[in-house]
Image (cartoon, rainbow, N blue to C red):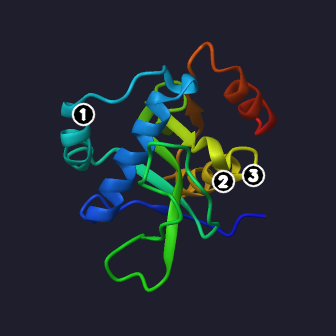
Amino acid sequence: MVDLKVIKADLNEPNHCKHLIILLDAYASDIMGGGENLSEYTKDNLAAELKKLPQAHVFIAYSKSKYEKSEGSEEYSNKRIKTSSDDTEEWIPVGLAICFEGFSTFACKKLLNIHDLCVLSEFRRRGIGSALIFEIENFAKQLDCCKLTLEVLSGNFAAKKAYIQAGF
């Protein structure tokens, strides 16, 4: 079992912004995310642009488990990364969800859409995606959302299967 915590990211916190970009870039470059790295423009501006949107919500999953990242990625190899400047414990960022508030015209209430959800390949099939969804569901309830929706790339069959198992 992975020692895990999921937080709602604070985009005023530099480490959270850094982890957002690292995780989203890992997802984008993975075949599950389309197979292409984020552009330099996106890497440089995404956190600041999301911060401007009060309806944007970012969740990051952290693990205490050590692991070796594959060749060419020193971001994670046996390194502990502090989750915030005042965090005395060190955790490794392993999963990410980016959500946006929307509106259901039929229910006349807010909804929450999971736009991006990813787990580093080394940590998949350990319940991290489910833990992210659980935290997002609780957050959606706090916002009094009528439903939770998600998006998935048409060819991402593993994600589709996981979402069905999660009740979507």
Q: Say which of 167 and 21 sits in front.
A: 21
Image point (46%, 38%), residue name: 26
**N-term mark: 3 or 2:** 3
**63 w.r.t. 68: above or below:** below
Judging from the image, what secondary structure is the residue with disc 2 in?
helix
Q: Is residue 68 above or below residue 52?
A: below
SS at badge 1: helix
The x, y position of residue 33, in whole percent, is: 51, 26
Tell me the quarter of the image containing the N terminus.
bottom right
Q: Around disc 1, counting alpha carbons within 10 Å, would you say few (fewer than 14), some (14 to 19), or many (20 or more)?
A: some
Residue 168: percent from left, percent from top: 72, 31
Question: Residue 5 versus residue 135: which sits nearer the camera?
Answer: 5
- Which residue does the numbered mark 3 point to in the structure image? 126
Report the side of 137 relative to 42 (left or right).
right
| CA–CA distance in space, label 1 to label 2 | 28 Å
Look at the image and tell me whether residue 168 can be seen. Answer: no
Position of 98 with respect to 156 (left or right) is: left
Q: Tell me the kind of residue under disc 3.
A: Arg
> Contact (CB < 8 A) between labels 1 and 3?
no
Q: Which mark is residue 42?
A: 1
- Image coordinates of residue 102 in percent, x first then y, are 42, 34
Q: Which residue is mark 2?
A: 134
Crowdedness near tag 3: few (<14), some (14–19) or many (≥20) residues, C-alpha within 10 Å: few
Q: Earlier in the sequence, mark 1 or mark 2?
A: 1
Residue 95, how many percent across, how many down?
55, 50
